[in-house]
Amino acid sequence: MDETNKKLAHIFEEMGIIYEIKGDKFRPRAYHKGADILNGMTENVADIYKKSDVSGLVKLPGVGQGIAEKIEEFIKTGAIKEYVNLKKEIPIELEELTSVEGMGPKMIKTLYKELNIKNLNDLESAAEKGQIKNLDGFGEKTERNIIQSIAFLRQGTGRMLLGDALPYAREFMEEIKKINGVLHVNEAGSLRRRKDTIGDIDILVAAKKQNALRVLEYVASLPNVQKVWGKGKTKISVHIQQGFDIDVRVVDEKSYGAALQYFTGSKAHNIKLRKIAIDKGYKLNEYGLFQIQKSKPKSNENFVAGRTEKEIYNKLGLKVMPPEIREDLGEIEASLRQSSGQAQKNKLPDLIEYGTLRGDLQIQTSWTDGKHTVEEMALEAKEFGLEYILITDHSKRLAMTGGLNDKKVLEQKKEIEKINKKLKDIIILAGAEVDILKDGSLDLKDSTLEQLDIVGISVHSYFKLSKKEQTDRVIKAMQNPHADILFHPTGRRINRRPAIDVDMDEVIKVAKKTGTILEINASPSRLDLRDEHIRKAKEAGCKFAISSDAHSKDHYKFLEYGIAQARRGWVEAKDVINTYSAEEMLRLLK
DNA sequence: GCCGTTTTCGGCCCGACTGTTTTCAGTCG
């Protein structure tokens, strides 16, 4: 599917590193940015090229004429000459080697020149033989670090799920808060931006200087710490048993807002912000916003703001943007205060708030692969503060879950009616998660579907159809007048299974036209739709359902991740059908 | 190589920490 994107991203990543090795100052930045863009994109560049040529490619942020032409060359010939030549000169597995903590272009260059190290295996054996410590600029410690880094790298599992990282970080922060002298604690980085996956956990602490050490000592002494990468007066970076890194940074209260802003990122968001600061005669760093006085020599910088994020953004003429949208995808432009007479093209959205869902629209029970009964799920939902739930057990095609046939679905509906009479303050709606069959027809009869309150449809088979077949199939299913919600539209399982190859632009178009609701599945390993598609769908005017896909009573908490994902897609409460009462919500369906 | 309500040329974010060094380059985020 987006194989082309991945291959090109790898090539540009390596070209960036090669140019770093060669000492080029600015090309590396351009290529790394290009690689980042490609990695973060869900749309295939080959499709963009097919549709609108090089002129379409240069519209991508960070892609100019040069990189666009290289993309074209790759699509046409399957290779990029410049890259091939560079690799001849420097035949090293660069992306592999830079993934070793502490290994950068300069070290790689030396290791290649002196020891002919080209890949991870070469590096590991050289380190184990003790050949590295004798090189100029290297030593005992570097060699030991390399061995440990490689060990962690080999056992590593990639990026962790938001649903794993956030609960862990919250527990961790509770402990930090107990330390004497700690004033504030907050998560930062991609975790605070609520990305679907997290590289490492960033924690920010406000404390007086004399207390900072206590915090860092505490972190270093935790029993699950396997390796301290570094520890200074204000920060510590550790690798923990669970297989990931935690960075903790301590700042003075006066700089807390500046540091929070800085460490929340994203990098692209920060770079743009600092450019705005420079234009206004300021300098922005993690300690605050400073007025630069050009006439006087250094150290004559006056502190302007830093205690809160709000102070800083406001001084720069911006509103505070929710962390979830700080990706430099138009949020800065949208938050620029209106200057006189200028029409504001892109308004900052009024994002859906956490805790505002009134119902949950995908729940499995013990009728199929869920752990608890309808009644148990209903009681827990009430406890959780929901007003209604939709029961959506699987249909018969999904035999391994004990999927229900038409008769069983209607039996379940009767049971739901009975329980509804018994329970107060919670409405149970009868639905189903109906399999979309290979040809796009549905796994239950229309005569059954029309008796249900809401019908969810989803793909659980034939994940590898061609884009055309897959898209036609999904669209045909969406056109069924009973199909209300398209569940987990791309079918991805993070770190496990790629998304199906479906033309999301088409799906979005058809969703809008047919009034099919798109699900934002909140299960941490799905988070499907993902942010980028959500944003597109929102712009196209689609409506969403955020649902937990609960298979157990304790899965309602997943809803928080779904809201996070929705916020990353600039979604507002009015776009989400389960922010309405059950009655209003039902009126929003086909 | 990218980018532009000052610019199509001339800029390009900023600081902590490490290891191996005698004062700093390299890496990271």
Image (cartoon, rainbow, N blue to C red):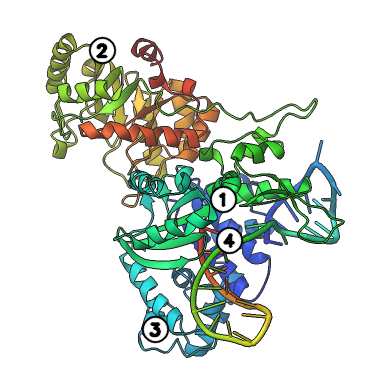
| Among numbered discs 1 and 3, the one appearing first in the sequence | 3
Distance (Cα) linking label 2 and label 4: 54 Å
| A231 shown above or below A366 | below
- Left/right placement of residue A473 relative to residue A404 reads right
- Specify the amino acid type for callout 3: Ala
Q: Earlier in the sequence, mark 2 or mark 3?
A: 3
- Mark in front: 2 vs 4: 2
Q: CA distance from mark 1 to mark 3?
A: 40 Å
Callouts 1 and 4 on one subunit? yes
SS assignment at label 3: helix
Bin the neighbour count of mark 3 within 10 Å (Cα to Cα): few under 14, some 14-19, many 20 and up.
Answer: some
The answer to whether the residues at label 1 and label 4 have Cβ atoms under 8 Å apart is: no
**Are the numbered discs 2 and 4 placed on the same chain, yes or no?**
yes
Kind of residue sitting beneath label 1: Asp
Which residue is the site of mark 1?
A: A252
Residue A80 lies, in percent from the top left, at 57, 67
Which numbered tag is attached to residue A28?
none
Residue beneath disc 2: A425
Q: CA distance from mark 3 to mark 4?
A: 28 Å
Question: Label 3: which residue?
Answer: A127
Label 4 resides on the chain identified as A
**Which of marks 4 and 1 precedes in the sequence?**
4
Q: Quadrant of residue A492?
A: top left
Amino acid type at image mark 2: Asp
Q: CA distance from mark 2 to mark 3?
A: 65 Å
Residue A58 position, x and y percent, is: 66, 50
Front residue of A330 and A491: A330
| Mark 1–mark 2 distance (CA, rounded to whole Å) | 48 Å
- For label 4, the SS is helix
Do labels 2 and 3 touch, CB within 8 Å? no
Residue indicated by mark 4 = A32
